[in-house]
Image (tube, rainbow, N blue to C red):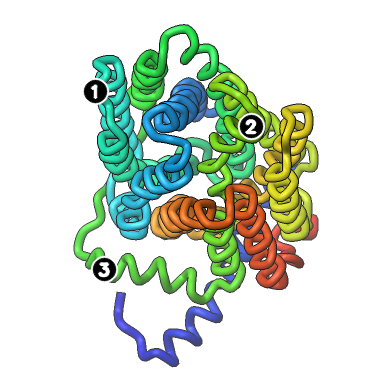
């Protein structure tokens, strides 16, 4: 790609990107009206992907719950907040470091093969944690190291999986596939923590980690059974220039840039509630592992309801407005949850929080995906992963330190207020988006 003078570059990008975004969104709108909620399942590759991911993600949530409880058993009450925050930050640090550049690799090579390698790596790490726990030699340091290695795997795996969806279903079923993925993820969020509570009680934490390792086999088999065309590796283009090309698209697309900034704010300020939830579960709600699992399941059930809400609404024109509603609902419910002293109050509040979180996440993902040209998808989604997952270390460590000073409740409340404030500040850039509001003539 020839280098442009700065003024010429800005003028050219300002002219081309809105047209390109409108054309891509137009194509998505024209086909979506006739698609059903399950239209993505007509694609064999997506069916294999969905089933494998559902099993694997259930195992992943099982491990998340078991690992949080294991850490609480390894440290004193006085060190609980700081330990959970630091371990979560270390686990997410590789995403902060590597995911920004992972998109260049994803856009160059077979996404299916990349995901196979990352899933095998994650499986081996789960078995390693199971073995250490079973032999009663596991330490906080070992958990942090395994978390760092798993975060390195996820830095490549997460954007590769999201970018792979369009290759399985095509652009016409992309919106439906994103909705189904949200339902799948949160179905696993419901099942995994619920299973975790019983699994920890029945087979111990080592057994829970082992079952997570076994769950990866399903997705690996599904990936290997897929029929995908051979990848055509790119040649002759500098990786640095390709990376800059993706950043240039984001820089001059006001809506995508605003959505990415808002996603980072949610990750830093609001999402660390999950890191602090074990402390509220044990010391405010007086729950053990099973009750802690119910709290996570309540969030997942609400998020699943959010996915079905979006599906029932179809391809509506006011996604920006609904996105803001979801964000603010999530933040308000987090503030209420921080005050909970009984499960009868905490569970319905977390259900509504999960609903708002899903509305926010799914619509952000959809608006970004329909605005990105296919050849830049891996790079832009990698930046989205960076903002959504890579900012977690900042949020987790800050939440842990803040909770140590002002208490768990104050840390959650302050984070929710800041996240809502950023959403309100940026809302003019996406609030009135009309990307899907097209005439019937355009659909023809």
> Can residue 374 be spotted in the picture?
no
| Residue plotted at (62% across, 22% down) | 291
Element type where label 1 sits in the image: loop
Left-right relation of 345 to 385: right
Nearer to us: label 1 or label 2: 1
Tag 2 residue: 300
| Residue plotted at (31% across, 82% down) | 3
Q: Quadrant of the N terminus?
A: bottom left
Towards the viewer: 348 or 327: 348
**Nearest to N terminus: mark 2 or mark 3:** 3
Tag 3 residue: 240
Give the quarter of the image for residue 9.
bottom left
Q: Give the answer, above or below, for where 278 lies relative to 1.
A: above
Left-right relation of 116 to 34: left
The residues bearing labels 2 and 3 have C-alpha atoms spaced at a distance of 39 Å
Tag 1 residue: 137
**Are discs 1 and 3 less than 8 Å apart at CB?**
no
């Amino acid at each position: 790609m020839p280098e442009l003078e700065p003024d010429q570059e800005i003028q050219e990008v300002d002219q081309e990107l809105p047209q390109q975004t409108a054309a891509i969104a137009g194509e998505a709108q024209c086909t979506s009206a006739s698609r059903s909620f399950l239209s993505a399942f007509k694609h064999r590759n997506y069916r294999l992907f969905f089933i494998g991911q559902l099993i694997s993600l259930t195992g992943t949530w099982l491990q998340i719950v078991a690992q949080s409880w294991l850490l609480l058993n390894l440290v004193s009450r006085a060190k609980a907040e700081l330990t959970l925050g630091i371990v979560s930050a270390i686990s997410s640090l590789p995403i902060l470091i590597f995911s920004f550049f992972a998109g260049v690799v994803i856009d160059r090579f077979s996404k299916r093969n990349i995901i196979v390698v990352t899933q095998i790596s994650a499986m081996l790490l789960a078995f390693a944690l199971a073995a250490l726990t079973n032999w009663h030699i596991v330490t906080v340091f070992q958990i942090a190291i395994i978390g760092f290695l798993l975060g390195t795997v996820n830095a490549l795996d997460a954007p590769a999986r999201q970018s792979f969806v369009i290759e399985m279903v095509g652009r016409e079923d992309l919106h439906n596939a994103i909705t189904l993925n949200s339902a799948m993820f949160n179905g696993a969020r419901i099942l995994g923590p619920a299973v975790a509570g019983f699994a920890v009680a029945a087979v111990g934490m080592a057994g829970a980690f082992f079952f997570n390792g076994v769950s990866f086999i399903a997705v690996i088999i599904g990936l290997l059974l897929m029929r995908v065309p051979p990848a055509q590796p790119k040649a002759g283009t500098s990786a640095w220039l390709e990376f800059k090309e993706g950043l240039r698209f984001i820089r001059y697309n006001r809506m995508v840039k605003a959505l990415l900034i808002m996603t980072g704010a949610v990750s830093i300020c609001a999402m660390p509630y999950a890191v602090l939830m074990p402390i509220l579960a044990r010391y405010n709600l007086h729950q053990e592992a099973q009750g802690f699992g119910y709290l996570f399941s309540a969030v997942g059930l609400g998020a699943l309801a959010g996915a079905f809400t979006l599906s029932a609404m179809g391809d509506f024109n006011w996604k920006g407005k609904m996105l803001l509603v979801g964000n603010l609902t999530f933040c308000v419910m987090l503030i209420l949850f921080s005050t909970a002293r009984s499960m009868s109050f905490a569970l319905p509040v977390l259900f509504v929080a999960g609903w708002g979180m899903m509305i926010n996440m799914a619509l952000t993902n959809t608006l970004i995906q329909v605005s990105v040209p296919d050849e830049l998808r891996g790079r832009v989604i990698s930046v989205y992963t960076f903002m959504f997952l890579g900012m977690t270390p900042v949020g987790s460590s800050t939440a842990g330190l803040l909770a140590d000073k002002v208490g768990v409740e104050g840390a959650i409340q302050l984070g929710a207020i800041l996240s809502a404030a950023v959403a309100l500040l940026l809302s003019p850039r996406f609030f009135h988006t009309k990307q899907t509001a097209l005439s019937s003539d355009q659909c023809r």
